[in-house]
Image: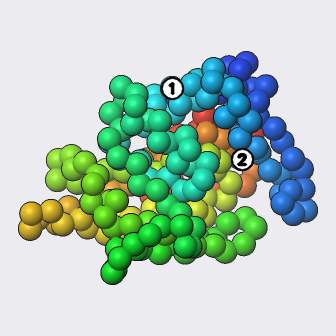
Amino acid sequence: MCKNLMEIDAVKKRIKFYPDWPSEGINFIDIMPLLADAEAFRAVVDAIDECVTAPNVAAPEARGFLFASPLMMTDGGVECVIPFRKKGKLPHSGDDLVGVSIVKEYGEDNLFFRKSDLSEARVTDGVIEVTLFDDILATGGTAVGMAERLSALTVERDGVAYPVKVKEFVFMGEIEVLEGRARLEAIAPVKSLIKF
């Protein structure tokens, strides 16, 4: 069971809400103020660490991997973070770059990751298990796109092909009214630390 972050005062006072931003009808949840408070940031990382059970974490930019990367320094067992970035942000050679089409609540987008980053992931029982982590679950478009693309891949090492399996989705927050959870539960279990 994941800890409810809104029960932690240091966290609760840092999360900000902006109605109708970036466009009308969208209510933006700003978690960036957590970076200004070491106690709040540590509480969030510890809570995420308790939820993540895979040794590998895939996280989109920028808030996703801002909060996922410190998991490699905890005792929870995360050994590899695979960053998903926007176009033009990942240097690469040859066919190392993999594109992911996503549909968000405010439009279509693309993210990219490198196969070479995924090849560093830990293999467990013949499978590369991945937790998909992001800051906020809204419609689930980003997570679905990432999960579908990762699940279609295998990673080859020493002549052996290892399938990639999305073990779970973990989010700092979930906007329940947008029903993104239902889309994701068809793929893997969903955990969130705050429900809005």
Return the x and y of residue 79 as percentages of the image width and height.
Answer: 32, 41
Residue at image x 21%, y 50%? 123
Mark 2 surroundings within 10 Å by alpha-carbon count, few (fewer than 14), some (14 through 19), many (20 or more) = some
In this rendering, position of residue 15 left or right of residue 35: right
Return the x and y of residue 187 as percentages of the image width and height.
Answer: 45, 58
- Secondary element under disc 2, as helix, strand or loop, is loop
Residue at image x 27%, y 54%? 120
- Quadrant (top left, top right, bottom left, bottom right) of the C terminus: top right
Outermost residue to the left: 159
Q: Along the polypeptide, which appears first: circle 2 or circle 1? A: 1
- Secondary element under disc 1, as helix, strand or loop, is helix
Cα gap from disc 2 to disc 1, whole angstroms:
22 Å
**Which of the 4 quarters of the picture holds residue 22?**
bottom right
Which residue is at the front of the view, 150 or 14?
14
In this rendering, position of residue 152 left or right of residue 113: left
Residue 46 tag number: 1
Return the x and y of residue 58 as percentages of the image width and height.
Answer: 44, 53
Residue 13 showing in the rendered view: yes
Residue 4 showing in the rendered view: no
Count of marks overlaid on the render: 2
Residue at image x 83%, y 51%? 27
Q: Which residue is mark 2?
A: 175
- In front: mark 2 or mark 1? 1
Return the x and y of residue 105 as percentages of the image width and height.
Answer: 73, 65
Residue at image x 23%, y 54%? 127
Q: Amino acid at mark 2?
A: Ile
Residue 149 tag number: none
Q: Amino acid at mark 1?
A: Asp
Outermost residue to the bottom: 94
Which residue is at the front of the view, 128 or 110?
110
